[in-house]
Image (cartoon, rainbow, N blue to C red):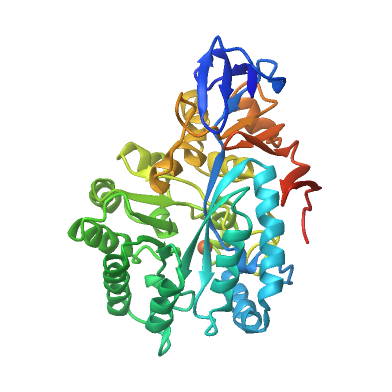
């Protein structure tokens, strides 16, 4: 297959020839009839969604206050009643939507404090069912805490035995600071035993005294887990004192932790105890990048107990991040695309990028450049995975051997 007149991120106009792998970039010619003219529009590698909750996606419940706490109450009520089939159906709808918007890598949490572990089992099936169109990692996530309820630690262990990809934790949700620290140590010991990456919810609060990221950094260094740890949200960082950020961020960078803000939900769930001016609570991306911290983004939720909106488009997530952290300097804006592409690939340790010999994973957009991509947030015209077109125009996805229309909700 050949894409002609592709504009790369560095501005070059090239032809790209590929089968499963990219074979030629530059003056390449097709030896078959499969040619797509990109018309000098931007061709980029696909997006990552580094933090998501497929088990709660599309529940479309009414959270009257819009707060985190009501969301937690609703979820606690509902999760035991969900069926595996329902979780699979909602999740697959979401995965297809995300794929149609150009995301090929999705890291989802599965709440393992639902004691039958049906949520995890369902998402492990979704991972398998969707593997032709997306790469999914499932994190065993102790939503209610590891030590808040007897047996949650065993459920986390069992989740890993069942085949979860990553180990989750939520230290700020444990009953005490000491339990929070203990939960981090527990997660790292599991990581060592099962040789897995860590993917935690860390310091998701406005409380400036919530400082579990430093503990995560300590264990990452101590256990030699650099490059294998993601810290989701870290919204408390927004409220930390500058002097503390100045001390801790270089350590976080040297510990090889990827911090994953979730701008859409951070903007609406944080600052709820504030009058005006009101904090928006997203971890400060520009500052983290300045200190050399790897930063990637997550969509977190679509139409679930915590967030009533969401389209599955990672450009919308990036758009929100840019606004909240005022990343509108020219270079900042152009380089911001790394937050949903290259930085995530680094955390995922994925084979990535448009280079000869690499997997042919490509998006053909209708944008002239990153700025136009962000202005209009259009879905890609073509999504190509391992050399095959798997989605078109945000409307159609190739699934189980045939083209089907993409649904915006189940
Ligand atoms: Fe989350």
Query: What residue do we see at 62% from left, 79% from top?
Result: 79
In the image, taking residue 195 as reference, residue 98 lies left or right, namely right
Query: What residue do we see at 78% from left, 42% from top?
Result: 395
Which residue is at the far top? 27
In the image, taking residue 63 as reference, residue 144 lies left or right, namely left
Residue 311 appearing in the image = no
Percent across and percent down for residue 220 are 25, 58
In the image, taking residue 168 as reference, residue 390 lies left or right, namely right
Q: Quadrant of the N terminus?
A: top right
Count of labels in the image: 0
Q: Quadrant of the C terminus?
A: bottom right
Could you say which is closer to the camera, residue 135 or residue 69? 135
Could you say which is closer to the camera, residue 280 or residue 188? 188
Which residue is at the far bottom? 150
Query: What residue do we see at 57% from left, 58% from top?
Result: 300
Residue 30 appearing in the image = yes
Could you say which is closer to the camera, residue 64 or residue 189? 189
Which residue is at the far left? 222
Percent across and percent down for residue 366 are 70, 26
Q: Quadrant of residue 166?
A: bottom left
Which residue is at the far right? 405
Percent across and percent down for residue 396 are 77, 43
Q: Quadrant of residue 91?
A: bottom right
Query: What residue do we see at 72% from left, 58% from top?
Result: 93
Percent across and percent down for residue 56 are 63, 68
Q: Is residue 383 above or below residue 402?
A: above
Q: Is residue 22 above or below residue 258?
A: above
């Amino acid at each position: 297959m050949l894409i002609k007149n592709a504009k790369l991120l560095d501005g070059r106009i090239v032809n790209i020839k590929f089968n499963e792998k990219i074979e030629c970039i530059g003056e390449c010619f097709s030896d078959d009839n499969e040619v797509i003219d990109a018309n000098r529009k931007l061709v980029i590698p696909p997006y990552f969604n580094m933090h998501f909750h497929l088990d709660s996606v599309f529940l479309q419940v009414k959270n009257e206050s819009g707060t985190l706490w009501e969301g937690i109450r609703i979820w606690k009520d509902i999760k035991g009643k969900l069926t595996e089939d329902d979780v699979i159906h909602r999740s697959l709808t979401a995965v297809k939507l995300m794929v149609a918007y150009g995301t090929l890598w999705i890291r989802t949490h599965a709440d393992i404090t639902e004691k039958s572990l049906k949520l995890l089992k369902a998402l492990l099936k979704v991972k398998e069912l969707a593997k032709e169109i997306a790469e999914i990692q499932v994190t065993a996530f102790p939503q209610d805490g590891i030590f808040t309820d007897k047996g949650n630690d065993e459920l986390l262990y069992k989740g890993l035995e069942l085949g979860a990809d990553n180990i989750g934790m939520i230290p700020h949700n444990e009953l005490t600071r000491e339990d929070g620290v203990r939960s981090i140590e527990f997660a790292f010991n599991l990581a060592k035993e099962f040789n897995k990456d860590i993917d935690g919810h860390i310091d998701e609060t406005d409380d400036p005294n919530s400082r579990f990221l430093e503990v995560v950094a300590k264990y990452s260094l101590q256990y030699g887990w650099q490059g294998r740890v993601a810290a989701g949200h870290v919204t408390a960082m927004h409220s930390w004192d500058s002097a503390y950020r100045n001390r801790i961020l270089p350590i976080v960078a040297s510990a090889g932790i990827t911090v994953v803000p979730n701008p859409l939900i951070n903007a609406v769930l944080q600052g709820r105890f504030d009058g005006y001016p009101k904090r928006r609570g997203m971890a400060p991306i520009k500052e983290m990048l300045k200190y050399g911290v790897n930063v990637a983004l997550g969509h977190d939720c679509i139409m679930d107990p915590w967030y009533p909106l969401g389209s599955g488009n990672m450009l919308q997530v990036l758009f929100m991040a840019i606004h909240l952290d005022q990343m509108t300097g020219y270079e900042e804006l152009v380089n911001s695309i790394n937050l949903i592409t290259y930085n995530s690939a680094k955390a995922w340790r994925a084979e990535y990028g448009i280079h000869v010999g690499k997997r042919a994973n490509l998006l053909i957009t209708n944008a002239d450049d990153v700025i136009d991509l962000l202005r209009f947030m259009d879905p890609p015209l073509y999504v190509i995975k391992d050399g095959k077109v798997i989605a078109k125009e945000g409307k159609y996805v190739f699934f189980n051997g045939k083209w089907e229309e993409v649904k915006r909700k189940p």
